[in-house]
Amino acid sequence: WRRTAVAGVGLFTDLYDFQVINICRTLLEDEFPATDKQRAMLTSAALLGSVVGQLAFGAAADVLGRRGIFIATAIITALASLGAACAWDSPRLSIYAMLSLWRFML
């Protein structure tokens, strides 16, 4: 039952991450108007990051072991969440680009 619980927690965090951006994007657009390209980039960054992460970390887990890779991905997720929470808008990099980068890592 432990494996099922761990898999369930992983699935919950992925689904939560995909859902929460739709709510946040709506709130962000009140303060920071977005173009269609920025909306698409923000929404698709996590999906692209999931595919890349599953392929890369899945292969690494086969070689290095699942436990170590699970811990590494948990740390990366925590750091990327902190980065997304601290994202700001600047003249050089919009808040949407910064959030897209962090969401890719999530």
Image (cartoon, grey):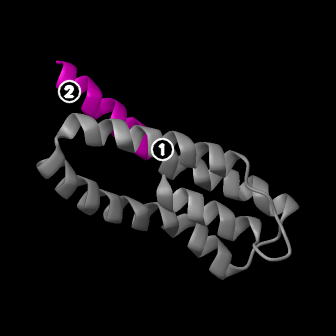
Q: Identify which residue, 84 or 35, lies in the foreground.
A: 84
Position of the N terminus, as image quadrant, is top left
Q: CA distance from mark 1 to mark 2?
A: 20 Å
Outermost residue toward the front in this view: 64
Q: Identify which residue, 78 or 103, lies in the foreground.
A: 78
Number of numbered discs on residues = 2
Residue at 27% from the left image edge and 61% from the top image edge: 56
Q: Is residue 16 left or right of residue 23?
A: left
Instruction: Give the overall secondary structure of the magenta segment.
Output: helix
Residue 50 image-quadrant placement: bottom left
54 w.r.t. 34: above or below: above
8 inside magenta stretch:
yes
> Which numbered disc flags the more N-terminal residue, 1 or 2?
2
Residue at 41% from the left image edge and 45% from the top image edge: 14
Q: Which residues are magenta?
A: 1-16
- Numbered tag placed on residue 4 in the rendering: 2
1 w.r.t. 57: above or below: above
Q: Secondary structure at mark 2?
A: helix
Report which residue position mark 1 lands on: 77
Amino acid type for the residue under numbered disc 1: Thr
Residue 34 image-quadrant placement: bottom right
Dot 1: few (<14), some (14–19), or many (≥20) neighbours within 10 Å? some
Residue at 69% from the left image edge and 46% from the top image edge: 85
Residue 49 image-quadrant placement: bottom left
Amino acid type for the residue under numbered disc 2: Thr
The spot of residue 88 in percent (x, y) is 79, 58
Q: Secondary structure at mark 1?
A: helix
Outermost residue toward the left in this view: 62
